[in-house]
Amino acid sequence: MPTTLTIKGQVTIPKRIRDALGLTPGTLIDFAVNHDGEVVLHKAAGPRGKADVPWRTQDLMALLRG
C-alpha cells in the first residue's frame, strides 16, 4: 500500500495500519530499521510527560533566574 512522502518528510499512515496498532492522534510512535533494512513502526511505550505548571511564563523565568 504505497503512500507519498511530502516535501517535509511526512507520510500518511494508512487507516488499516493505524487501526491494527491502535494509533490515534497524539500517539507516540517509534521507528526502527531491522537487520534486513526494513522500517519497523510500533506504538511507543508510555506517554511523554506534560508540564502542569499553573505559573505564568514571567513568574517561572524569575524563579529560574533567581
Image (cartoon, rainbow, N blue to C red):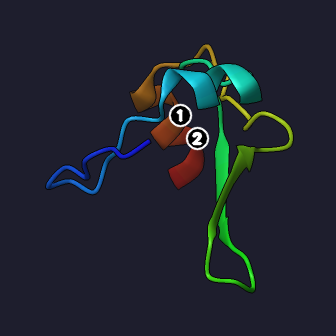
Give the residue displayed 32% in from the left and 44% down from the top: 3
Q: Nearer the viewer, residue 50 or 35?
A: 35
Q: Position of residue 58 (x, y in %)?
A: 40, 30
Residue 46 is labelled as none
Q: Quick one: 8 or 63, which is closer to the camera?
A: 8
Is disc 1 surrounded by few (<14), some (14 to 19) or many (20+) residues within 10 Å? few
Label 2: how many Cα within 10 Å (few below 14, some 14–19, many 20+)? few
Q: Which residue is mark 1?
A: 60
| SS at mark 2 in the image | helix
Residue that label 2 marks: 63
Q: Say what amino acid the circle numbered 2 marks.
A: Leu
Report the Cα–Cα distance between label 1 and label 2. 5 Å
Which residue: 53% across, 34% down? 60
**Figure quadrant of residue 44:** top right
Q: Position of residue 32 (x, y in %)?
A: 67, 68
Q: Is residue 66 visible?
A: no
Which residue appears farthest toward the front when viewing the image?
1
